[in-house]
Amino acid sequence: MPDPAGFPFPVKGEVAVFHGEFYRARAALGLWPSAELLPDPGRPAPVGLAPREAADGSVGYLVAPERLEAWYAVTWTFRWRGELFECTAATPATLSGALGFRGQLSA
């Protein structure tokens, strides 16, 4: 499930664990608190879940949160010249970010 830069997780977004597998995820629009799992191209669909097409044409696999092993919100932060940034994109050689991040950092 690497992001476009090849990192093992996206620099921003949601990740869920279902049957021991990590998937990009999002809240199922209009079906809260359900989640939709978004397998990367070339990966098989989550076992036992039916596909659901979203209004934007993307396909997700609806799952109730109690069936997930974990559901995470992912953000990356970094400091540059003493200022805290929220990472918005990454490549192997660069990071892009938004100045003025106002969240909590944890180790």
Image (cartoon, rainbow, N blue to C red):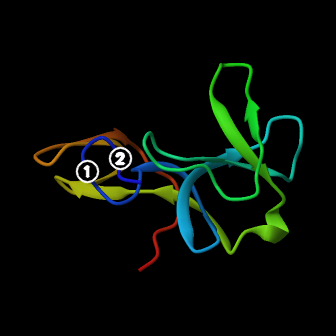
Kind of residue at badge 2: Asp
Q: Is residue 39 left or right of residue 65?
A: left
Residue corresponding to mark 2: 3
Local packing at callout 1 (Cα closer than 10 Å; few below 14, some 14-19, many 20+) is few
Residue neighbourhood size for the residue with mark 2, other residues' Cα within 10 Å, grouped as few (<14), some (14–19), many (≥20): some
Give amino acid for label 1.
Gly
In the displayed orientation, state which residue is furthest to the bottom. 107
Q: Mark 2 falls on what kind of element?
A: loop
Q: Within the image, what quadrant is residue 4 found in?
A: top left
Left or right relative to 82: residue 76: right
Which residue was labeled with disc 1?
A: 6
Q: Residue furthest right?
A: 31
Query: Could you say where residue 83 lies in the image, as x and y percent from the top left?
Result: 28, 52
Between 107 and 50, the residue placed more toward the observer is 50
Name the residue located 52 percent from the left edge and 63 percent from the top edge: 22
Q: How many marks?
A: 2
- Which quarter of the figure is the C terminus placed in? bottom left
Please give the name of the residue rendered at 79% of the width and 69% of the height, measured from the top-left corner. 67
Q: Considering the numbered disc 1 on the image, is that residue within a helix, a strand or a loop?
A: loop
Residue 4 sits above or below residue 63 on the image: above
What residue lies at 15% left-to-right and 43% top-to-bottom? 94
Identify which residue, 21 or 78, lies in the foreground: 21
Image quarter for residue 89?
top left
**Mark 1 and mark 2: Cα distance apart in space:** 5 Å
Residue 26 at x, y percent in the picture: 66, 45
Q: Quadrant of the N terminus?
A: bottom left
Q: Nearest the camera: 91 or 55? A: 55
Residue furthest out toward the left: 93
- Disc on res. 27: none
Is the residue 42 above or below the residue 54 in the image? Answer: below
Relative image position of residue 25 (x, y in whole percent)? 62, 50
Is the Cβ of the residue at disc 1 closer than 8 Å to that at disc 2? Answer: yes
